[in-house]
């Protein structure tokens, strides 16, 4: 840290040195992003085993179990609640955004998935040689979302209990 402008002690742990540059790095963000990446890696392993061949496409997929979006926002909200208190304004804001992301993953993206399936069926029937097809793996079931919430919140709670965040 720069000695001319020392930060109060609680804020020092949010700063790390990367390539000689001082960048703000939130441990909650790093932990939440790591949880999301772990969920995506789980999808690759799970669906590759199910199909009997390695398929890296699942790492970039928006659907499937667990919902990495739900895990990401749930872990971040859990971490904020654990660090600032579940009665804090910051937790309230995070909770609202988590609810919006989860609602969109279930309702909005679920509707988009249904439309993609219907459009693929219609267009493949009328234009079988010309139509590539829309991605039908977009939304989540309620179980996939609940899995993401439990994994995200649970892993953040575990990381907090062992003192990593």
Image (spheres, rainbow, N blue to C red):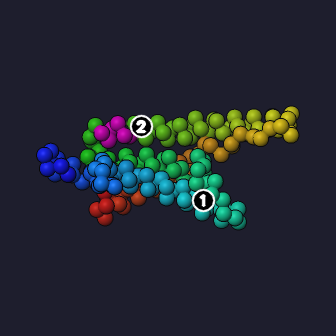
In this figure, what is the number of numbered marks?
2
Which residue appears farthest toward the front when viewing the image?
20
Crowding at dot 2, Cα within 10 Å, few <14 / some 14-19 / many 20+, comes out as some
Q: Which of the two residues, 99 or 4, is positioned nearer the viewer here?
A: 4
- Compared to residue 18, the image places residue 133 above or below, namely above
One can see residue 150 in this view: no
One can see residue 22 in this view: yes
Residue 22 image point, x, y percent = 28, 50
Instruction: Please tell me which residue is depicted at 27% across the width and 41% down the height of the picture.
Output: 87
Q: Secondary structure at mark 1?
A: helix
Q: Main secondary structure of the magenta part?
A: helix
- Compared to residue 27, the image places residue 115 above or below, namely above
The magenta-colored residue range is 90-95
Residue on which disc 1 sits: 44
User: How far apart are the alpha carbons under marks 1 and 2?
Assistant: 27 Å
Instruction: Please tell me which residue is depicted at 24% across the width and 54% down the height of the picture.
Output: 13
| Location of residue 160 (image quadrant) | bottom left
Q: Mark number for residue 97?
A: 2
Left or right of 6 in this view: 17: right
Residue 111 among those drawn in magenta: no
Crowding at dot 1, Cα within 10 Å, few <14 / some 14-19 / many 20+, comes out as many
Residue 107 image point, x, y percent = 57, 36
Q: Secondary structure at mark 2?
A: helix
Residue 46 image point, x, y percent = 61, 62
Left or right of 42 in this view: 30: left
């Amino acid at each position: 840290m720069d000695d001319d402008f020392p930060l109060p002690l609680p804020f020092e742990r949010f700063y790390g040195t990367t390539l000689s540059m001082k960048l703000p790095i939130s441990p909650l963000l790093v932990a939440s992003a790591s949880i999301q990446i772990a969920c995506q890696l789980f999808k690759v392993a799970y669906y590759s085993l199910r199909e009997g061949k390695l398929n890296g496409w699942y790492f970039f997929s928006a659907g499937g179990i667990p919902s990495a979006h739900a895990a990401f926002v749930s872990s971040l909200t859990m971490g904020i609640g654990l660090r600032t208190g579940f009665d804090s304004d910051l937790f309230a804001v995070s909770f609202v955004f988590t609810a919006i992301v989860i609602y969109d993953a279930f309702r909005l993206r679920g509707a988009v998935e249904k439309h993609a399936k219907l459009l693929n069926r219609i267009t493949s029937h009328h234009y079988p040689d010309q139509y590539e097809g829309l991605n039908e793996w977009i939304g989540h079931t309620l179980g996939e979302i609940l899995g993401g919430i439990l994994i995200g919140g649970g892993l953040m709670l575990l990381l907090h209990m062992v003192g990593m965040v």
